[in-house]
Image (cartoon, rainbow, N blue to C red):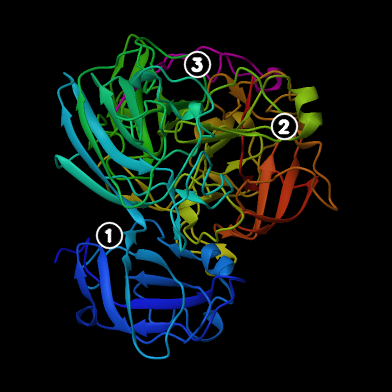
Amino acid sequence: MNSQSRFSGLWIVQFNKSNGKRNGTPIYVVNGSDVMQSGNELGMPIKLKAADAAQVIYVVANTGSSNLFSGASAPADEATLNKMVYSTGEYHQPSSSYGIPMLGRIEVSKVDATTTLLTGTLERLFAKVKLNLKNEFADFVVSYVQLKNAATGAYYRTAQTGAVNFPTSATGNHIDYQSEAFDKDTYVYYVPENLRTTTGTVNSAGERTLDKTDGKATYVEIAGVHDATTPVIYRLPLGDVATDIADFNVRRNRTYTLDVTLKGANTVDQRITALAQAAGAVAPANSFMVYPGTKVNFDARIRGNGGNVAETGLATAIAPASVVLLWQDAQGLITNANATTGVVPLSSGVATVQTKLGTNGNAVVAAYSGANGTGTILWSWHIWVTDYAPVGQASVAANTAYTVTGGQVHTYGTQYLAANPGKVIMVGATYNGVITDAISYTDVSKISGQYYQWGRKDPLGRANGMITDDYFTLAPWYNAAGASFSAAPVGMGTVPPVSAVQEPMTCFILGLSDVNNPWGDGEAKTIFDPCPAGWRVPKIGTWGDFTSDGIPVNVVYPAAGERVSYYSTDMYNVGGGGYYSSAPNSSVLRIDGEIYEDYGTYYYGMWYSSALSVRCIQE
């Protein structure tokens, strides 16, 4: 018997049909050998509670739990049972110990006092998804394969029927499975029932997109890079396409087979997204978002966005002799840096930084006045390697989360929209596709992101380790050779902006001096703004709808803590609070709570030296 059909432990729960109340104590049958079966047909002698009236008998198999319906956990009635969920966590795989959870609902006219032969049919609570994948797309390298929007659990009830969204789209009801490398021809998943209604017209396979549903249809995502420059993402929703091209349902006890051959990036097929990257130098900025496995070309002769801050005396144009990798927070993230010198290619003033396929992370490269990283640092740039692709929306509504590639963008409240018409906030990549206040995350690397001292453009590391207390060390940095070293050491005193430019890896104990509003007035982007092109540090009114005694909007920023450099090199309050910088001054949005669960939000002043989170807003 294979693991998809085997029985390993059965629960029998009896209810009165008339009122739905449980009748007797649930029975647990330990050994599969006690059950005689043919396919999914069930026949077994079992002693039920005698009843003269009609009864409903549930038989539940392969839960892996001998305590599921025992004691206080026994459902009082059928409705309660139907609301109970077999939670899968991140993934379900049948094993030699127990197979796929199954359920049968059997109605009988009565139950005799003697042993009764119970006969019925069990159905698997999961569907099987089989992906057969071939890559015939020339010069296309697959980064990963991932099943997304799987329901997080299977309900102990009979299969849903009709046009419904089940489970609901509420936070926590869906999850993305872990991505896998393209190292095999066939991928197999077992997923709970996930039914989605169609909200638009679908006339062809190329029109089967998530926006034709509520966005929660289960789908397979295949991502990669074409010609080392263009990220391409294929999103293939599941459903009974042979019967109905507009079907997005994943029904239990069925097998869904996807035979996929990648041949190109057909722009007519709406399931395919090609994230075009500029062939020449990208728009000037202090940060560049780069898809893993691609490269970025930028003009290293331009400081920041090409603007100026009069008090600094800094000229816009520079003449670097070399560009060098200073640090990366994932080993091997930057693949074209010389292992000895850290030098990356520089031609006619344009630097080229190549990133590693399938690896997200951060790096900083710097322009030097001398060859091979000698002389003075003239400027530096943040290389943000991510599959997150924040984009604007055709229209935006207050307090709304929009799903984009790799994460979400958000709006908040009516004051936000009044001050920023048509604009969204960059929230960032999510953890496993979910931003929620219902799940307690413990992996700091999934929630913290980079930290910035107010007014400075260079990131100063992220928290490391697991959440166990208020304090955390910084995640290590690596040089071009892969050797680790301590991130962002503390420098004494205050520092004028010109000196800070020359020391992009140092977190100064008292922050910047001798300049007013290096991040500007909140309207125009400045030369020190740490955000990518098209984005800027938000002005203080962005979160104007938030209040200290209750929040009329949905706060989903992580409690990423802060780096308080004036007395420690460690991170503080990670998991206990979130602090988000804004322009034109050091007023900070503070969120007190546990990870994502908000307990209070308000503005207050912070030390210039504190390194905090930044969430960029569209220009």
Of residue 305 and residue 488, the one placed in the foreground of this image is 305
**127 to the left or right of 464:** left
Res 514 label: 2
Res 501 label: none
Q: In this view, does 283 lie above or below 577?
A: above
- The span from disc 1 to disc 3 (Cα, nearest Å) is 48 Å
- The span from disc 2 to disc 1 (Cα, nearest Å) is 60 Å
Mark 3 residue type:
Pro
Dot 3 corresponds to which residue? 284
Give whichever of discs 3 and 2 has the lower sequence position: 3
Residue 212 visible, this angle: yes
The magenta stretch spans residue 407: no
Q: Give the range drawn in magenta.
A: 293-320
**56 to the left or right of 526:** left
Where residue 566 sits: x, y (%)? 65, 54
Mark 1 residue type:
Gln
Mark 2 residue type:
Asp
- Looking at the rendered image, the quarter that the N terminus falls into is bottom left
Where residue 134 sits: x, y (%)? 15, 30
Tell me whether the residue at label 2 lies in contact with that at label 1, contact meaning CB atoms closer than 8 angstroms.
Answer: no
Residue 202's quadrant in the figure?
top left
Q: Main secondary structure of the magenta part?
A: loop
